[in-house]
Amino acid sequence: MYALSDFDFELPSDLVAQAPLPQRGASRLLEVASDGLHDRVFTDILELLKPGDVMVFNDTRVLNARFFGVKDTGGRVEVLVERILDISTVLAQVRASKSPPPGTLIRLADAFEVIVGEREGEFFRLHFPGEAITLIEAYGRLPLPPYIVHEASDQDERRYQTVFARSPGAVAAPTAGLHFDQPLLDKLQIKGVRLAWLTLHVGAGTFQPVRTENITEHKMHSEWFHLPVETAALVREAQQGGHEVIAVGTTSMRALESASQTGALQAGSGDTQIFITPGYQFKTVTRLVTNFHLPKSTLMMLVSAFAGYERIRTAYAHAIRQRYRFFSYGDAMLLNLDPVWAERR
């Protein structure tokens, strides 16, 4: 049984990427293969895939979900929208000196007022005076992750979105997808790699720390996903043909595995709280493109479950020695499913 401390590691602060590289495909790629570790550039992924393989991307689009505002009492607040619940209601984190009771008015971005509703765990329902998504996109700010220390710039507005983002609803980018530009996507298709799409709206809970040493006590955050019929059909076709199913990012991984809990991949929509830790038996995904993750995070647990704990420890130690760039704007890995699970499929 693994504990939280098993997923810790020392990371020099200067390896936390604070800005994207000038070109999306210029990032590095650490291939974690059965015969060892291979240092590559990201565009090498083209030669590592075969015709008939299916790559599954998350097409979610990051909302301008961060607001600064003032309560009707004069106190300052910061609001981070977690999820749009209906046309005029959202679930949000509200940071203030005192927790706002229901009925509190908050003026956001000096543009409009919301009414605080019921509290739901660490979140609050906020009632907007009109269509929430329109007001969010018009007046909100791009919510960069907490480890990126500068305010969002024009460059961030362009580069903290994937080139295929089209379904607004996330508060964090599916960052493995940030490495792909349209020319690379075109080359993959020309080679015969099938591209497929799903939507998982990444929530602020993706940055929620695990606070218990016993990781089984951690309560996973909930995220909404949609797996189209067309994507499920492409994945099943690849599986029947003996081809790879490559999840681009842990969000695509979580959606695919959530939709496979009956044993076979099922199209549809719903919420997922899937918590993938070592010992989980993967049902659909055979390869994973992912960035480097935070110490002691649920995503470190996921990649350790997928590729093997010792293999991930070795890969991260190598990446630190070779000065790979970490986290959202950092470099990437290509992981293969741990042979222990691959043999059981």
Image: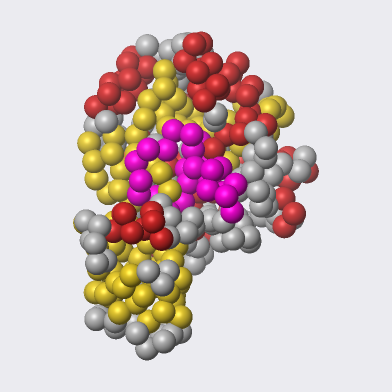
**Quarter of the figure with the C terminus:** top left
Based on the picture, tell me whether residue 310 belongs to the magenta stretch. Answer: no
* Colour pattern of the rendering: secondary structure
| x and y, in percent, of residue 54 in the image | 42, 21
Residue lying at the far bottom in this picture: please name it.
Answer: 73
Using the rendered image of the protein, determine whether residue 314 is visible from the camera's viewpoint. Answer: no
Residue that appears at 53% across and 16% down: 187
Q: Quadrant of residue 90?
A: bottom left
- List x then y, in percent, for residue 154: 57, 50
Q: Is residue 296 left or right of residue 133?
A: right
Q: At x 62% / y 30%, what residue is drawn?
A: 25
Q: Please give the name of the residue rendered at 27% of the width and 23% of the height, measured from the top-left corner.
A: 230
Please indicate whether residue 215 sits to the left or right of residue 223 in the image: right
Q: State the extent of the magenta-drawn residues as a range.
A: 153-177
- Quarter of the rendering containing residue 216: bottom left
Instruction: Check residue 160 for magenta coloring.
Output: yes
